[in-house]
């Protein structure tokens, strides 16, 4: 993104634009950042801000590459260590490669207590990592004193503890604290009173806070409110007061309001002032004192370094006691403090020389987002300290001998200092299955490489699968990919890039989707061979499926996801926690069919309508047409069967498409013009004929009142660019599905105008058909709608005519369905959706949306940014260490965060629920009872086997949707003698089936009691029969 032209490259930045907005993107493109310290934390921040698209970043570092850097800096290689290169020289070209629009330069000059800091004045943001506290104070004072102030961020990582500090100056203005898009909310009523009370329609929650302002639009009666901003005072979730309305005209009906976003000013103090009385964020409510405890411990660590010129030695008891004493002294002088946590201090002392790469990734994501806030004023800044620890990772390791943690001269020394040699070895031999190699997948692979997960020499493996190819828009956050990788498979490319970070990793890349169709590959033995499953997916359905396979095979699952600046992680451990499927998000609210078809009220309705039109005309109908002619290969046979009175599903739609099929570009333009007339003129005329503007409902209220908007017919005008775009894009799409060629000249305004001059538009005659107004009615299925005898006769004659006129050729029985592709601006797909939506919005007087917003809604694009992705992947990898160590329930943490606010909440996972059947028999989602049978094993044998093995006899047995045995069903008692083989009819390779069973209740009249699935193996050894 060149700063001079200020053009945003949407093909690269589209997903991030939806998070930050164009104004913030423009500000980033004019901002320069200074980043010091190329350790694990520094390189994470460098990566994220380069991906985000600042104008320039200077990387600063004075150290030489060492072997231990390989365990925390993913851009340093063995060759860099062997060639004794400076760290900054090694990483600079690799950071620069991430984004062609960012100028990356480097500095290895000394930055210490004697450096002249005036060189910093050309930067808008300065970030220090690996800097002593005294230097941080000095640089912070300099930045704070400048006019305008330079935004300062200080970050530190010592073993299991991390801190981030922000100072953005005396007054820092934020344009948008949350980034949430204000919703239009319709009004039920406004009282004429002091104060006037606004009530939302249909009890919709307004989501407002007292003191905020709203602006009113389209209010009828109390028209003085329109365009006016009023401060609100919240009364209930559905109502609020807006000051005196007693002198205004009474509210008649309708109108809506929108929240007005107002800038907010934040005040910051320097580190020096904040040390004694720190403002901290509390991420884990189960240990609210932790941030202040880490604050004191890390300040003591700063003092230790000043006094000894080094960090505490790994496992040195004397150093730990010195640090504990220093922490108590520091704590005594703090105004805002908590009791000293001796266990935390000792763990910090023991691990301070170490590094936990996933913790650096998590905190690096948070710090990078703060840097972006610093230069854009978008989102609420951190005030002013953020602390995060991973004490749960090291707590169970404290009794291990000190030798476990001592360096061995390899890339894992930093990690070993934190988790010990035995745990490192467990990680090396780990077998991980990761589903998805997108943004989270790339970040996870980086974490695996730094942790040494799945090493070939230890018989470990990282198996990854993703069917997708790399697209340009991926490069903005999927940092293992480069421009020359576009259109290559994600999984294979990611595997190669991971190998570059750590050549010892054994990465096995697949191109499969994980779904029921691939259970032959991802079978039970496959899952049994894996230790951990990680999902890096972008949809709920796929997560649910993978979760069910993990539960079935007793495998831990680590799940995470992001949406914009929000992220979540969920840890699922067999027999300890609930599974992903144990909870269900409420389903997305569907827009009622009649609203989409006739009564849109907001822009989302017109966009969805346009998207549905695309799907129906250019995807669904061509697909249906093709499948019909694949089933019925001869038109003559179809004609004979229809003449004999046979009803063939889809035949009416297919024959209509065949008889009206265009042959030339001219006809495609004609069809587009007729569609314009139908959608944007006749629809309005018909609605106003059926429901004139003065129509009233039974209760006397107006039919056309908010949220219903009366349409206004649009007269076609080729000089209107929106009209022209609709005609050309619609004609192009019809030409494509009918395989009709066209040239660039055919798309010109002159040529289109020439064609349209010959197109005759039939005169409009209003119809008396019924228009659906019931919001509960679903869209009817065209294929299954009954046809009148007249329609049947017409279809037969159309087909006869097509056969007689030789219109039935192999080419004409084939169409080319289109798949909606939002990211290719040359294909006309978005042109059609954007122009159709905008014209419909104009017809209904709805505020239009720009192309960017239309693309997001029509393409169901999930906003995404690298900072949140890096943070969730880091948090998941920390939990993975605990899973590998076999830690107890109390050590695991799920996380939800929103970096915009910023808020982070760490919580315990939901513990597994045990269901009581009766007596002492319980089961959970992780239980599966097993019965091994044979060829002659009957249903009766199965029920006896369950009773003998588990102490309770089933009363009902179901397989999938098939009821095998329900006592009350007629004839079912005879089934008891049938073999399981005969009842289930398994395929030749089927080893087992999972049966749903229930048991007799303890008292008559009660419902049957549920039980765990019963896995029935067809052979006594469980092998394939």
Image (cartoon, rainbow, N blue to C red):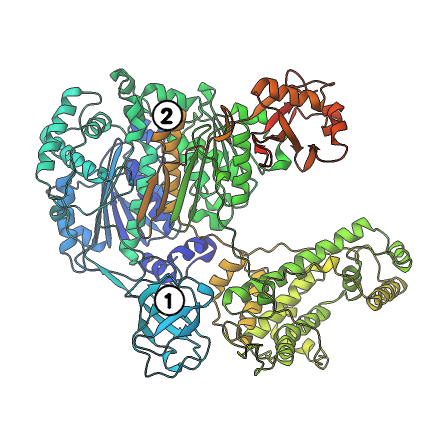
Measure the C-alpha gap from mark 2 to mark 1.
Answer: 49 Å
Residue 436 in view (yes/no): no
Q: Could you classify mark 2 by the number of other residues whose Cα lies within 10 Å: few (under 14), some (14-19), or many (20 or more)?
A: some
Residue 856 is left or right of residue 787, and the answer is left
- Element assignment for label 1: strand
Which quadrant holds the C terminus? Answer: top right
Q: Is residue 96 above or below residue 546?
A: below
Residue 158 in view (yes/no): yes
Q: Residue at x 61, y 25 (%)?
A: 1015
- Element assignment for label 2: loop
Which quadrant holds the N terminus? Answer: bottom left
Q: Position of residue 672 (x, y in %)?
A: 67, 70
Q: Residue at x 57, y 67 (%)?
A: 595
Q: Which mark is residue 887?
A: 2
Q: Position of residue 250 (x, y in %)?
A: 40, 82
Locate residue 971: give its quadrant.
top right
Report the residue marked by disc 1: 239
Q: Is residue 927 above or below residue 790?
A: above
* Viewer-nearest residue: 823 or 520: 520
Q: Are marks 2 and 1 in contact (CB under 8 Å)?
A: no
Q: Could you classify mark 1 by the number of other residues whose Cα lies within 10 Å: few (under 14), some (14-19), or many (20 or more)?
A: many
Q: Position of residue 849 (x, y in %)?
A: 48, 67
* Viewer-nearest residue: 770 or 1023: 770
Locate residue 355: give its quadrant.
top left
Q: Which mark is residue 431?
A: none
* Viewer-nearest residue: 845 or 907: 907
2 vs 1, front mark: 1
* Sooner in the amino-acid sequence: mark 2 or mark 1: 1
């Amino acid at each position: 993104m060149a700063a001079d032209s200020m053009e945003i490259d949407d093909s690269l930045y589209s997903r991030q634009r939806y998070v930050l907005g164009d104004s913030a993107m423009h500000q980033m493109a004019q901002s320069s950042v200074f980043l010091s310290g190329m350790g694990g934390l520094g390189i994470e921040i460098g990566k994220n801000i380069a991906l985000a698209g600042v104008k320039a970043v200077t990387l600063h570092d004075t150290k030489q590459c060492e072997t231990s850097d390989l365990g925390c800096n993913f851009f340093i290689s063995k060759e860099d260590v062997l060639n004794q290169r400076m760290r900054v020289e090694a990483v600079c070209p690799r950071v620069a490669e991430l984004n062609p629009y960012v100028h990356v330069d480097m500095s290895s000059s000394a930055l210490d207590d004697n450096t002249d800091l005036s060189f910093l004045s050309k930067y808008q943001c300065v970030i220090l990592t690996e800097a002593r506290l005294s230097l941080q104070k000095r640089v912070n004072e300099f930045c704070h004193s400048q006019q305008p102030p330079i935004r300062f961020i200080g970050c530190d990582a010592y073993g299991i503890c991390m801190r981030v500090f922000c100072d953005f100056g005396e007054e820092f203005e934020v344009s948008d604290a949350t980034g949430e898009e204000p919703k239009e909310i319709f009004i039920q009523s406004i009282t004429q009173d002091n104060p006037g009370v606004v009530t939302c329609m249909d009890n919709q929650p307004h989501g407002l806070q007292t003191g905020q302002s709203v602006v009113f639009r389209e209010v009828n009666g109390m028209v003085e409110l329109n365009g006016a901003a009023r401060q609100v005072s919240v009364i209930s979730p559905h109502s609020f007061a807006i000051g005196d309305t007693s002198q205004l005209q009474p509210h008649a009906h309708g109108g809506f309001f929108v929240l007005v976003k107002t800038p907010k000013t934040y005040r910051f103090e320097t580190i020096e002032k904040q040390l004694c009385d720190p403002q901290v964020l509390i991420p884990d409510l189960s240990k609210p004192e932790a941030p202040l405890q880490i604050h004191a411990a890390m300040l003591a660590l700063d003092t230790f370094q000043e006094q000894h010129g080094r960090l505490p030695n790994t496992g040195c008891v004397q150093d730990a006691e010195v640090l504990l004493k220093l922490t108590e002294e520091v704590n005594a002088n703090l105004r805002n403090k908590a009791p000293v946590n001796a266990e935390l201090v000792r763990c910090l002392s023991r691990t301070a020389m170490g590094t936990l790469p996933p913790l650096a990734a998590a905190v690096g994501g948070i710090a990078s987002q703060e840097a972006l806030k610093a230069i854009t004023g978008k989102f609420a800044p951190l005030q002013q300290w953020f602390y995060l620890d991973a004490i749960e990772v090291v707590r169970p390791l404290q009794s291990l001998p000190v030798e476990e943690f001592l360096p061995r001269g390899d890339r894992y020394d930093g990690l070993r200092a934190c988790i010990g040699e035995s745990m490192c070895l467990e990680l090396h031999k780990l077998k991980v299955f990761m589903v998805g190699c997108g943004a989270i997948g790339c970040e996870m692979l980086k974490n695996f490489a730094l942790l040494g997960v799945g090493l070939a020499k230890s018989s470990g493996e990282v198996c990854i699968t993703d069917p997708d190819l790399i697209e340009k828009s991926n490069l903005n956050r999927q940092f293992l990919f480069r421009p020359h990788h576009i259109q290559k498979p994600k999984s294979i490319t990611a595997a190669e890039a991971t190998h570059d970070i750590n050549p010892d990793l054994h990465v096995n890349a697949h191109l499969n989707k994980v779904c029921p169709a691939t259970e032959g590959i991802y079978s039970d033995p496959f899952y049994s061979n894996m230790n951990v499953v990680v999902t890096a997916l972008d949809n709920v359905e796929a997560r649910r499926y993978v979760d069910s396979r993990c539960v079935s095979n007793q495998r831990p699952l680590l799940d995470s996801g992001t949406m914009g600046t929000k992220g979540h992680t969920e840890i699922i451990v067999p027999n300890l926690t609930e599974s992903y499927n144990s909870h269900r998000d409420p389903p997305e609210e569907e827009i009622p069919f009649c609203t989409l078809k006739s009564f849109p009220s907001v822009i989302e309705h017109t966009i969805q309508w346009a998207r549905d039109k695309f799907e129906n005309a250019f995807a669904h109908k061509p697909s249906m047409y093709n499948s019909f002619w694949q089933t019925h290969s001869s038109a003559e046979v179809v004609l004979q069967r229809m003449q004999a009175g046979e009803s063939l599903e889809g035949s009416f739609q297919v024959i209509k498409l065949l008889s009206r099929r265009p042959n030339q570009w001219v006809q495609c333009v004609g069809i587009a013009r007729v569609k314009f007339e139908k959608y944007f003129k006749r629809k309005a005329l018909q609605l106003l004929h059926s429901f004139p503007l003065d129509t009233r409902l039974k209760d006397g209220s107006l039919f056309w009142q908010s949220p219903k908007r009366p349409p206004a017919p649009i007269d076609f005008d080729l000089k209107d660019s929106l009209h022209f775009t609709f005609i050309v894009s619609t004609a192009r799409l019809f030409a494509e599905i009918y395989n009709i060629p066209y040239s660039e000249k055919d798309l010109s305004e002159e040529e289109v105008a020439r064609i349209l001059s010959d197109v005759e538009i039939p005169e409009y005659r209003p119809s008396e058909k019924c228009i659906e107004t019931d919001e509960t009615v679903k869209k009817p299925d065209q294929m299954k709608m009954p046809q009148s005898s007249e329609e049947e006769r017409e279809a037969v004659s159309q087909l006869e005519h097509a056969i007689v006129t030789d219109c039935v050729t192999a080419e004409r029985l084939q169409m080319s369905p289109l798949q909606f592709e939002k990211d290719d601006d040359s294909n006309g797909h978005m042109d059609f959706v954007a122009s159709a939506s905008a014209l419909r919005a104009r017809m209904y007087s709805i505020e239009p949306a720009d192309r960017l917003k239309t693309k997001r809604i029509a393409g169901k694009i999930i906003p995404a940014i690298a900072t949140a992705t890096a943070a969730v992947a880091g948090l998941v990898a920390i939990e993975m260490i605990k899973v590998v160590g076999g830690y107890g329930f109390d050590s695991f943490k799920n996380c939800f965060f929103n970096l915009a606010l910023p808020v982070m909440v760490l919580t315990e996972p939901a513990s597994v629920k045990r269901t009581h059947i009766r007596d002492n028999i319980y089961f959970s989602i992780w239980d599966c009872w097993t019965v091994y049978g044979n060829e002659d094993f009957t249903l009766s044998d199965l029920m006896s086997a369950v009773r003998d093995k588990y102490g309770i006899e089933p009363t009902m047995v179901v397989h999938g949707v098939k009821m095998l045995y329900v006592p009350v069903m007629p004839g079912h008692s005879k089934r008891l003698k049938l073999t399981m083989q005969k009842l289930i009819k398994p395929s030749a390779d089927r080893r087992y089936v999972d049966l749903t069973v229930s048991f007799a209740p303890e008292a008559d009249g009660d419902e049957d009691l549920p039980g765990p699935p019963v896995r029935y193996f067809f052979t006594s050894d469980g092998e394939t029969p």
